[in-house]
Amino acid sequence: MKTDVRTRFTKKVIVEAFLSLLREKPLSKITVKEVCEIADINRSTFYKYYLDCFDLVEQLEQEALRETGEMIQAMRAQKPETVLTQMLEQVQKHAELFRLLEGQGDSDRFTQKIAMVCFQSMEQGRAGAQEQNTMPFAFVTGGAGAVIAYWMRSGMKEPPEQVARVILALCGKALQ
């Protein structure tokens, strides 16, 4: 379903206002009223698109995960290192948003979801892939998510290709 220009603009203004507040304080301290004041919109406009600020975060996460999954699906024929590198380049490109999302709630929760989307897609492309609810899969996604979270927290100094090689080397046995 195509979204009209006004809707996209309104959502963009809401998200920008929300992210500016999220840079200053935790999600639990942000109110819809504050978002609306900064975005210069009515509360009813906010509620047209989001239930509350937690729903806004959830929708931002889902959009990031959807885009990541689509990008990875488009690259299914590529080597795992290439796919993982591209995913890490996306994380780097949207670093501020991902850091803000990662900073909410459970430690490393968002990067775990990103890693899961990446490895699910990579596993689907392999012949004879195992089910993704196995211990090795849990290990791989947990470890990869932790490495990505560490890379983000440490300022993303290493290039994405290097981080991808490290993740694949650490997870190599479990992926065989």
Image (tube, rainbow, N blue to C red):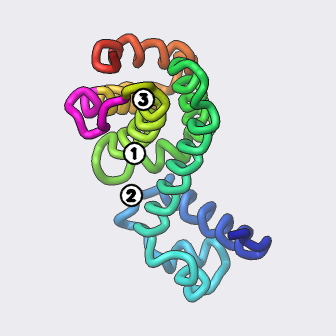
Q: Earlier in the sequence, mark 1 or mark 2?
A: 2
Vertical arrangement, residue 32 with respect to residue 104, above or below: below
Looking at the rendered image, the disc whose residue lies closer to the viewer, 1 or 2, is 1
Give the residue pinned by disc 3. 148
Q: Which residues are magenta?
A: 129-139
Q: Which residue is mark 1?
A: 110
The kind of secondary structure element at disc 2 is: loop
Q: Position of residue 127 (x, y in %)?
A: 43, 25
- Of the 4 image quadrants, the one containing the C terminus is top left
* 72, 56: nearer the viewer: 72
Question: Real-space Cα distance between discs 3 and 2?
Answer: 22 Å
Residue drawn 64% across the image and 37% down it = 74
Does residue 42 appear to the left or right of 142 in the view shown? right
User: Which mark, by number, is residue 26?
Assistant: 2
Pinpoint residue 115: horizontal percent, then vertical percent: 41, 35
Look at the image and say whether residue 166 sits in the magenta stretch: no
**Which residue type carries mark 3?**
Ile
- For mark 1, give the secondary structure: helix
Query: Would residue 61 be found to the left or right of residue 3 on screen?
Result: left
167, above or below 134, in the image: above
Q: Position of residue 125 (x, y in %)?
A: 49, 30
Does the residue at mark 3 contact the one at mark 1 (Cβ under 8 Å)? Answer: no
Q: Is residue 121 above or below residue 2?
A: above
Position of the N terminus, as image quadrant, is bottom right
Amino acid type of the residue that numbered disc 1 sits on in the rendered structure: Phe
Q: Residue at x 26, y 33 (%)?
A: 138
Q: Identify the residue at image location x=52%, y=25%.
A: 84
Which of pointers 3 and 2 lies earlier in the amino acid sequence? Answer: 2
Q: Nearer the viewer, residue 50 or 32?
A: 50
Classify 10 Å Cα crowding around label 3: few (below 14), some (14-19), many (20 and above).
many
**Does the stretch in magenta take in 132?**
yes
